[in-house]
Amino acid sequence: MIDALKIHDATISEGEKVPGCAMNAEEKLRIARQIERLCVSTIDAGEPMASTEDFEAVRRIAETVTGCGVSARCRPMRADVDRAWEALQAARMPRLCVIVDAPGGLPQEEKDRALGAVQEGVSAAIGHCEDVAAHFTQATSFSPEELMQYVYRAVGAGATTIVLADGDGYALPENFGAMFRAVRDRLAGAEDVVLGALCRNDLGLAVANSLSAVRSGAREIVCSMHGVGERAGIAPLEEVALAAWVNPGYWGCSADLHTGELAAASRLVGRMTGMPVPRMKPVVGAGVFHAAGKPGAVHRDGARRLTPGLVGMIEEHTVLGKDSDASALQARYAELGCALTPEDLGRVFPLFRQLAEQKHEVLDEDLFALLGGVENETENQFHLELLQVQSGTRLRPEATVEIRRGNERFRESATGDGPVDAAYRAIGKATGISGELTEYLTKAVSGGGDALVEVFVRVRVEGEEYHGRGVSTDVIESSARGYLETLNRAMQARRRRG
């Protein structure tokens, strides 16, 4: 019998832990909507107690997402639980996730307090909703007897899911699976309690450990798109789900995902976190279905075949041009899985027409890039109105920019070590914000000399890192737009801090 494997998506909450990848409420909502299309079991919307903006993000996701459960994290104390429920209560399928950070080996007095907190936190959560998970972040640090003390307290208080985490990322598959077998065996009489696994990827074993847990009785995996998370991240959703799908008979379960949305989810998360998808990224990388230059999929006998269409990869390019109208553009976006609102269409169509005048054929990759630019522009305070650059082999690069903020315009010029550096210095003078470039990556969106260029940058402002992305047929303009986006994020963070 093949059981259902529940996928608990933690892209939003884990993405927040990556330096320079903080997202605003609108960006988190966009990701939640796309993850919902995957038909995951639950979306972890974050921790409402962390900040007012985090509370607002959880609230908006809870109000919007209806196709799967929505979870909010809280510490095992009543004030945290009540605040999380306040943000979550509009959800159609709410879950409260009580986070237990207690390590193993505590002195008896401290352990007693920790056990009491588990019971108090889970009991308070059960008072609000029926779906409550107790998440033990350092489960692998417990002795078997100590672990069961915590598990019994949580189950006795009403927890419906027990998540055991390898918080250090040092577990080995055999040992991690053995822990789940032991807990499952000792929960006789509580078969309705679901065991979940969260594995950090410090040794590159997150997928192996997650699947070992599944083989040993776990029926829920906490994972994220691309494995985003603190340090080396956690198990990548796309890899865990497809590994179980390829040979469900071996694992005893399979995730019933709408896999055709994986590529779209991958592109969106790459844009929102400022971390583009590597070409050879398993399952969703652009190059993984090609061998020796020919499309294909390597698979072994008896296993289901992975194909580009399975994960929603674009196999044929539909070409739009300067004669295409707004309805044709909207129809193509719909075919690509992007349902544009009238407001989105109104913003992206002028950009499409501008691009169509520059290049004869606008490909699907170009459309995704244009939409990404519109998504990132909604929260911006500064806008690039003009960019002029002079550069040459015997000419010191100089850039002039005009920046708009509301009805104000600021024009400044600067020289630099190269045209990009000159543009960044001019933008710094115009905005009054200085940033230190820490990462810079360019990527051609499509082929040809007239291809769109994406530039991903990471910039340190006032000790904090922020990411940005710019898109244009001109690499200097893309660089300027990406840099300006990081400064806008820094401004947003400054306003939140008051």
Image: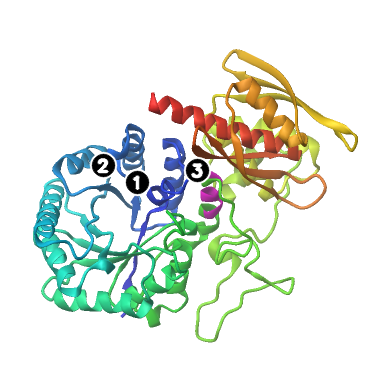
Can residue 363 be spotted in the picture? Answer: yes
Which of the pair 36/426 is nearer the observer?
A: 426
Which of the pair 19/385 is nearer the observer?
A: 19
Q: Give the residue number, with chain letter if any, for mark 2.
A: 88
Which of the pair 433/23 is nearer the observer?
A: 433
- Furthest-top residue in view? 407
Q: Position of residue 111 (x, y in %)?
A: 13, 59
Can residue 2 be spotted in the picture? Answer: no
Q: CA distance from mark 2 to mark 1?
A: 9 Å
Q: Which one is in front in this view, the residue at disc 1 or the one at disc 3?
A: 3
Q: How is the image coloured?
A: rainbow
Residue at the image point whose x is 50% and y is 56% from the top: 261
Mark 1 Cα-neighbour bin, 10 Å: few <14, some 14–19, many ≥20 = many
Mark 3 Cα-neighbour bin, 10 Å: few <14, some 14–19, many ≥20 = many
Q: Which mark is residue 20?
A: 3
Q: Position of residue 310 (x, y in %)?
A: 54, 66
Range drawn in magenta: 266-272
Q: Earlier in the sequence, mark 2 or mark 3?
A: 3
Majority SS type along the magenta span = helix
Callout 2–callout 1 Cβ contact below 8 Å: yes
Residue at the image point whose x is 62% and y is 65% from the top: 280
Q: Give the residue number, with chain letter if any, for mark 1.
A: 45
Amino acid at dot 3: Gly
Q: Position of residue 346 (x, y in %)?
A: 59, 30
Q: Is residue 271 magenta?
A: yes
- Furthest-right residue in view? 394
